[in-house]
């Protein structure tokens, strides 16, 4: 699904250059459920934005689902975002429209695609386990439920690849576990490839594969459960120390 080699992203701001990705290699098989961990500023969002076609790499090679993204025109980028990927952010739920119902929020993007909205929106809400809340206004839903609506919307274009940047950053740990379970179910039932960026070690424990980024490069790849627990714990301690 993803073949990324020597990926470089340099942000230029005035006279300053930020090397956000410094020759990153990453390969993801179709149907994987994986997590990318790393300290803040390590380049996780930058990588996800490249994968989602939200921003362009500076150099390297990036082939997603057989498409060579470094050869993309502007139109290819627009089509890619519309047809090939779903994207979920930390506060996605909060970016939805509070005074519309869950169902109406999901209908909106489908409407823009010119498809039959009602039936499809219902299917999507069912897929994320929210049928029973379809007619509640968004503002009446919990943070976790709102995030489910956002995930339903990310699935509206039937992507093969779902990218989630800190999707559980603003919900409690029980909700975070439920959202992870939802990703796992979508991974299993739809065969969706899921890449989750997180700095939550608990969450990273629950996926099939974890990759760590440090300074814009893959620092280690931790394939088996258990083998990366120490690294995760060290990271969590590092983050806690940094906050104090
Ligand atoms: P993470 O998601 O792991 O916290 P990011 O990918 O957001 O890290 O950022 C990686 C580095 O790139 C950081 O040093 C950050 O300040 C820088 N950066 C990210 N986006 C931009 C931007 N649009 N312009 C300039 N620098 C940026
Ligand atoms: Mg980030």
Image (spheres, grey):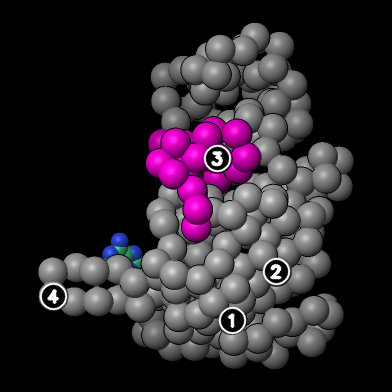
Q: Is residue 166 visible?
A: no
Task: State the residue position of label 1.
Answer: 218
- Of the image marks 1 and 2, the number of the one nearer the N terminus: 2
Question: Distance between the Cα atoms at labels 3 and 1?
Answer: 25 Å
Quadrant holding the C terminus: bottom left
Q: Closer to the camera, 51 or 108?
A: 51
Task: Find disc 3 in the rendering and name its residue.
Answer: 80
- In this figure, which residue is indicated by the disc labeled 4? 15
Which comes before the other along the chain, label 2 or label 4? 4
Q: Residue at x 83, y 45 (%)?
A: 191
Q: Residues within 10 Å of mark 3 (few under 14, many from 20)?
A: some
User: Which stretch did the figure color magenta?
Assistant: 70-95
Q: Is residue 45 above or below residue 71?
A: below
Q: CA distance from mark 2 to mark 4?
A: 34 Å
Please, is residue 135 above or below residue 43 in the view? Answer: above
Quick one: label 2, few (<14), some, or many (20+) residues within 10 Å? few
Pointers 1 and 4 in contact (C-beta within 8 Å): no
How far separated are the C-alphas under marks 3 and 4? 32 Å
* The quarter of the displayed image where residue 177 is located: bottom right
Q: Residues within 10 Å of mark 1 (few under 14, many from 20)?
A: many
Q: Is residue 75 left or right of residue 197?
A: left
Residue 58 position in % (x across, y down): 39, 67
**Residue plotted at (52% across, 34% down):** 79
Q: Nearer the viewer, mark 1 or mark 4?
A: 4
The quadrant of the rendering that contains the N terminus is bottom right
Q: Is mark 3 within 8 Å of ligand 1?
A: no
């Amino acid at each position: 699904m993803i073949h990324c080699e020597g990926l470089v992203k340099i942000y230029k701001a005035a006279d300053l250059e930020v090397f956000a990705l410094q020759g990153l290699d990453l390969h993801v098989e179709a149907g994987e459920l994986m997590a990318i961990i790393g300290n803040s500023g390590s380049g996780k969002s930058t990588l996800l934005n490249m994968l989602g076609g939200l921003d362009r790499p500076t150099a390297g090679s990036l082939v997603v689902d057989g498409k060579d993204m470094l050869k993309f025109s502007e139109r290819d980028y627009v089509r890619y975002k519309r047809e090939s990927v779903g994207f979920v952010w930390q506060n996605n739920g909060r970016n939805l429209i509070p005074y519309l119902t869950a169902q109406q929020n999901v209908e909106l993007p489908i409407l823009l695609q010119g498809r039959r909205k009602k039936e499809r929106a219902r299917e999507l809400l069912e897929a994320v386990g929210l049928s029973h809340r379809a007619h509640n206004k968004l503002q009446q839903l919990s943070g976790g439920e709102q995030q489910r609506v956002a995930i339903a919307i990310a699935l509206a274009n039937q992507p093969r690849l779902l990218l989630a940047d800190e999707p559980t950053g603003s919900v409690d740990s029980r909700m975070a576990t439920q959202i992870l379970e939802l990703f796992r179910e979508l991974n299993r039932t739809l065969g969706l490839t899921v890449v989750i960026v997180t700095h939550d070690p608990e969450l990273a424990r629950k996926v099939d594969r974890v990759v760590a980024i440090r300074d814009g490069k893959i620092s280690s790849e931790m394939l088996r459960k258990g083998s990366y627990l120490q690294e995760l714990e060290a990271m969590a301690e590092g983050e806690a120390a940094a906050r104090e």
